[in-house]
Amino acid sequence: MSRAEGLAPVLLHVALPSMAVVESALNAGYDGVMIDLQHGEIGLEQACNMLRAIPRGNQWVYARVASIDSGVIGRLLDSGARGIVAPSVETAAQARAFVHAVKYPPLGGRSLGPTRPNLYQGADYCQAGNDAVAAIVQIESAAAVQAAEQIAAVPGLDSLYIGPSDMAVTYGLPGRADWEDGQVAQAVEELAGITSKHGIGLGLYCSDPAFAASAMRTHGLAYAGLGIDLLYVGKQARVSLAALEEK
């Protein structure tokens, strides 16, 4: 699906252990998905099976892990994830440990042995794998924003992904997305400048399409999360029941 000028790729957060949800999202026009092993109901085996159901050529196939665990991260990458998102990173040391788990030598220490054949194409397999796979840290606290300059400078890191709801809570605000002003909005602007300076990407979770479009153009986002499958089910259920009551 073609996008209007200035609009970045969008990913659906997938919390339900369903290949059909992933297929439906991609068929509807989402550029990719973020399979959520942190907050969703998806286990490691289910996530690996879901990844295998997605064509290898899609670069926007991300998985968010619950913690920096090289075993889990390696399994997800070997099954075809093209990006791993590490939540709650607040220090450069955590970011370095994460990159070490995601990247092959010399950038990291990922073990060779993918279970999905012909995963990366290139004369130098490690280099091809490192080029194909994104190491993404989630910035979702005031402390992470303060350390973002050091985090963004970690070699091998590909992008920062902003979690606005958790970030808002650390500023004493309600836990929601789509902040047009205030401390979260200021943090997003600051992070946009930091990522641009260090030549890495910036992503942002959004719940409203209009806000997402504005943020893409204002901050030059490389990608955006837009919606969560489980929340979509609840939202549509409420709409349908409300319409029924009006009849």
Image: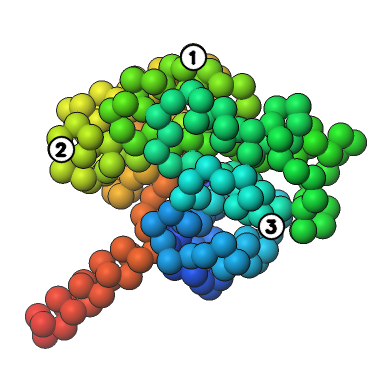
Labels 1, 2: front one: 2
Check the image and name the residue furthest to the right: 123
Query: Which residue is located at x 32 percent, y 70 percent?
Result: 233
Residue 61, compared with residue 99, is above or below; it is below
Task: Write down the quadrant of residue 126 in the picture.
Answer: top right
User: Mark 2: which amino acid?
Assistant: Leu
Secondary element at tag 1 = helix
Residue 87, compared with residue 27, is above or below; it is above
Give the side of residue 91 with respect to residue 156, left or right.
Answer: left
Q: CA distance from mark 1 to mark 3?
A: 33 Å
Q: Compare marks 3 and 2 and give the one earlier in the sequence.
A: 3
Q: Compare marks 1 and 2 and give the one earlier in the sequence.
A: 2
How packed mark 1 is, by other alpha carbons closer than 10 Å (few <14, some 14-19, many 20 or more), is few
Q: Nearer the viewer, residue 211 or 161?
A: 161
Q: Nearer the viewer, residue 158 or 155?
A: 155
Task: Write down the quadrant of residue 120 in the picture.
Answer: top right
Mark 2 — residue?
173
The colour scheme used here is rainbow
Observer able to see residue 67? yes
**Does the CB distance between marks 3 and 2 fall below 8 Å?**
no
Mark 1 — residue?
197
User: Mark 3: which amino acid?
Assistant: Ser
Q: CA distance from mark 3 to mark 2?
A: 38 Å
Residue 38, compared with residue 45, is above or below; it is above
How packed mark 3 is, by other alpha carbons closer than 10 Å (few <14, some 14-19, many 20 or more), is many
Labels 1, 3: front one: 3
Quadrant of the rendering where the C terminus is positioned: bottom left
